[in-house]
């Protein structure tokens, strides 16, 4: 079994909520930068069990709104692969069967890109392309995140 990276252990994930709960009260999503994961299982994010990893460089609330559109009224194809996977999972499992968690991370765009790429590399989500691994450096297993960037 692979050791959990030090940087991953520092992350304070939000309380888990299914899409139905978040759609009822989007105010629970912070208006703060960070990264998020969608899952089809009600469990802590871990490798191979995450559907999609994304990032919001300015506001998680604003970024996640595009994933939380009504699936009944969505007639056009999503603009990117990750959103398509999330919408498909919502159609298959309903909004009660797709879960969301986020971590608030107050770094600049470059810092958040590195965290997102590292999450993709470590969690191995089904819907993410691995091109971020080559565009952005990855955190090493023993790397630590700057504590001032982690909002807890």
Image (cartoon, helix red, strand yellow):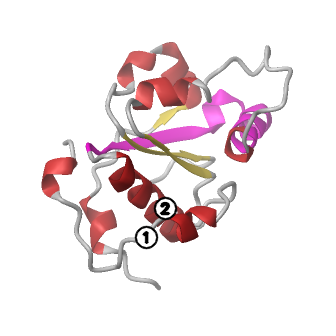
Q: Is residue 33 magenta?
A: no
Frontmost residue, 63 versus 14: 63
Image coordinates of residue 61 in percent, x first then y, are 43, 25
Of badges 1 and 2, nearer the viewer stands 1
Image coordinates of residue 14 in percent, x first then y, are 34, 40
In the rendered view, does 61 fall on the left or right side of 67? left
Vertical comparison of 90 with 137: above or below: above
Please give the label number shown on residue 117. 2
Q: CA distance from mark 1 to mark 2?
A: 8 Å
In the rendered view, does 17 fall on the left or right side of 83? left
Q: Residues within 10 Å of mark 1 (few under 14, many from 20)?
A: some
Q: Which residues are magenta?
A: 84-106
Please give the label number shown on residue 137. 1
Decide: marks 1, 2 in contact (CB < 8 A)? Answer: yes
Query: From where the camera sits, is residue 47 visible?
Result: no
Residue appearing at x 34%, y 79% in the figure: 141
Q: Residues within 10 Å of mark 2 (few under 14, many from 20)?
A: many
Count how many numbered circles sit on residues in the image. Answer: 2
Q: Is residue 87 magenta?
A: yes
Residue appearing at x 20%, y 49% in the figure: 149
Frontmost residue, 93 versus 6: 6
- For label 2, the SS is helix
Residue appearing at x 61%, y 26% in the figure: 66
Frontmost residue, 109 versus 115: 109
Going from N to C along the chain, the mark reached first, 1 or 2, is 2
């Amino acid at each position: 079994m692979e050791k959990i990276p030090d940087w991953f252990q520092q992350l304070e994930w939000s309380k888990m909520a299914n899409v139905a709960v978040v759609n009822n009260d989007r105010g629970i999503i912070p208006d703060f930068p960070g990264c998020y994961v969608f899952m089809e299982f009600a469990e802590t994010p871990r490798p191979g069990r995450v559907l999609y990893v994304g990032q919001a460089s300015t506001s998680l609330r604003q970024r996640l709104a595009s994933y939380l559109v009504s699936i009944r009224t969505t007639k056009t194809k999503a603009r990117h692969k990750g959103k398509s996977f999330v919408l498909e999972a919502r159609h298959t499992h309903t909004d009660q069967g797709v879960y969301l968690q986020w971590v608030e991370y107050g770094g600049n765009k470059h810092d958040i890109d590195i965290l997102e790429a590292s999450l993709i590399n470590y969690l191995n989500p089904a819907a993410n392309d691995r091109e971020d691994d080559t565009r952005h450096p990855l955190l090493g297993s023993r790397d630590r995140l700057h504590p001032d960037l982690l909002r807890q």
